[in-house]
Amino acid sequence: MIIDVHAHFSPRAYMGLLAKRGTRFGLGLPLPHTRDVPSYNSDSPEDVAGRLGAMDEAGVEMQVLSHSIASPYSDDEAAAAEAARSWNDSAAALTKQHPDRFAMFTALPLMHVEASLTEMRRALDDLGAVGVAMNCSALNRSVTNEAMAPLYEEMDRRGTMLYFHPAGNGMCSSLIQDYKFDFAVGAPTEDTQLVAQLIADQIPARYPNIKIIVSHFGGGLAVLLQRMDHELPYLNLPELPSATARRLYYDTVGHGSQAALLAAWKAFGASQLLPGSDYPVLLAFESYFDTFDYIRHSDLPAADITKILETNAADLLRHAKQTAR
């Protein structure tokens, strides 16, 4: 059975809170859908039942829930903390109701470090969260800079999972935004840039116990590793960028692209790939079953397909539950 590490959840109280607070929070922009499909994305009884039904049809045993680009980030610390608590409480209620079907990555009120530490500890210690979720940037600012060190130190102490997802900000670039490329080009570029920043700021080297997961195969990272090894010696890194990149984990959201899957498999190895769906976003383009089925029909070795779909995430989740407290 599959554990989906990239599954979004938009509780009603949380989304209402963001709507009331307005644009101070993360974007939460509507996505361009090509067909009308039910998302089953809130915590209403109907949506939860629909989500569970979709999981059963796709052979998904568990989803690890996270917030989407509709993030709890705000310059107003009290408002950000309230939003993060709201999402975490709603996600915890669902995981408690269905402990064998759902787990959660805790939301944080970035960029407020002390408030984030407080909420991280509450979610990991009291709510049963298995890790932490961050967007690739927060309020158009880096999440790998030195100001964030206390958060990484706490996660490293616990050996927890840290899941990164794009912010949907089009890389803060008019060259992307003016063409409405925020998701088609901007999101995977955010993933790529995030890993480059992790490497440059030596986050994996300094905090080796954190199990870092990056969305969408790490964007274009798989085809850039050798170039980065050649062109980043000025950073005086403790190891080649490619070596660091190969110690991170990447989810398999690739819109069914066999080329993306093959490149990631060659670049990172089967052991670093985890099942992901971007639920419910890809339902606009393919069925939930198809989001994983393209891996089964790839040219990868059968043993590696089993690792990717059935083994890796289960092992990581088991480790996280043992060490996150």
Image: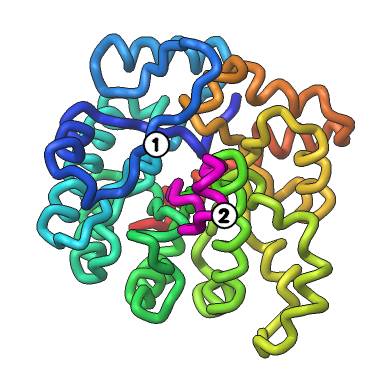
Q: What's the amino acid at mark 1?
A: Leu
Work out whether mark 2 precedes mark 1 in sequence or the reverse, and give the earlier one.
Answer: 1
- Judging from the image, the colouring scheme is rainbow
211 versus 239 height, above or below: above
Instruction: Report if residue 59 is visible in the image.
Output: no
Label 1, secondary structure: give it.
Answer: strand
Q: Nearer the viewer, residue 314 or 224?
A: 224
| Disc 2 to disc 1, C-alpha distance | 32 Å
In the displayed structure image, the side of residue 109 where residue 207 appears, left or right:
right
Question: Is 179 one of the magenta-colored residues?
Answer: yes
Q: Which residue is mark 1?
A: 65
Q: Residue at x 68, y 64 (%)?
A: 245
- Magenta stretch, residue numbers: 167-182
Q: Nearer the viewer, residue 202 or 323?
A: 202
Q: What's the amino acid at mark 2?
A: Leu
Camera-side mark, 2 or 1? 2
Q: Which residue is mark 2?
A: 175
294 versus 156 height, above or below: above
Q: Residue at x 60, y 19 (%)?
A: 285
Task: State which quadrant residue 239 falls in.
Answer: bottom right
